Structure formats: structure tokens, C-alpha cells
Image (cartoon, rainbow, N blue to C red):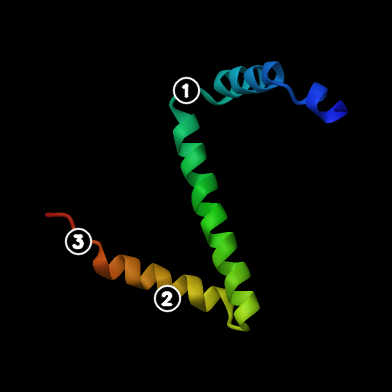
Amino acid sequence: MFLGEIFGPDLLIVVIVVAVLVFGGAAIPKLARNLGSAKTEFEKGLKAGKNGTDATNASDESAAKASETKPEADK
């Protein structure tokens, strides 16, 4: 129960308040998005490593597929 006492809801509130003060309210969603995409790339790399393929090739292929499906903006 020692960890439960250290990492309680009051500490979570303090950490959130400090993060908002340090990064600003507008930057928090951007940071969360970047963390989510980093997590996804990390999981792709783990999956590619288990399959024995090169992780950089797998991420390059997924980036190429994403750019092909993305419509270009009107100029």
C-alpha cells in the first residue's frame, strides 16, 4: 500500500497543474498527440522486430501509404 499512498489522486492533480503551468494549456493536446504517435511507432517497431523485418522499412511503407491516401490541398 506504500505506492498507493505516494501516487494518490492529490499527486496526480499537482502534476497536471504543474504541466499546464510549464507547457501552457494549448501545448498539452499537441504533446499528447505526439506521445500517442510515438507509442504507435514504437509498437510498430516491436511488431516488426518480432516478425524479423526491418522496422524502418515498415514505418516507411506505412508513411507512403498514408501520403497516397491523403488528398492534396488546393493551391
Disc 2 residue type?
Answer: Glu
Number of residues whose C-alpha sits closer than 10 Å to that of mark 3, classed few (under 14), some (14–19) or many (20 or more) = few
Chain-order first, disc 1 or disc 3 = 1
* Between discs 2 and 1, the one toward the N terminus: 1
Q: Nearer the viewer, residue 9 or 61?
A: 9
Gap in Å between the C-alphas at discs 2 and 3? 18 Å
Query: Residue 68, located in which quarter of the rendered image?
Result: bottom left
x, y percentage for residue 28? 49, 30
Left or right, 14 with reference to 57 = right
Picture quarter containing residue 56?
bottom right
Three-letter code, disc 3: Pro
Give the residue pinned by disc 3.
Answer: 71
Residue at point 33% right, 66% down? 66
Q: Residue at 60% of width from left, 22% of height from top?
A: 16
Quickly name the residue at label 2.
Answer: 61
> In the image, what residue occupies the spot 57% across and 18% down?
21
- Residue 73: x and y in percent read 17, 55
Whether the residues at callouts 2 and 3 have beta carbons within 8 Å, the answer is: no
User: Where does the image place residue 26, in percent across and percent down from the top left?
Assistant: 43, 26
SS class, disc 2: helix
The picture places residue 40, in percent across and down from the top left corner, at 52, 57
Q: Quadrant of the C terminus?
A: bottom left
Residue, x 51% and y 48% (percent of image)? 36
Question: Which residue reaches farthest front?
Answer: 1
Q: Is residue 75 above or below residue 68?
A: above
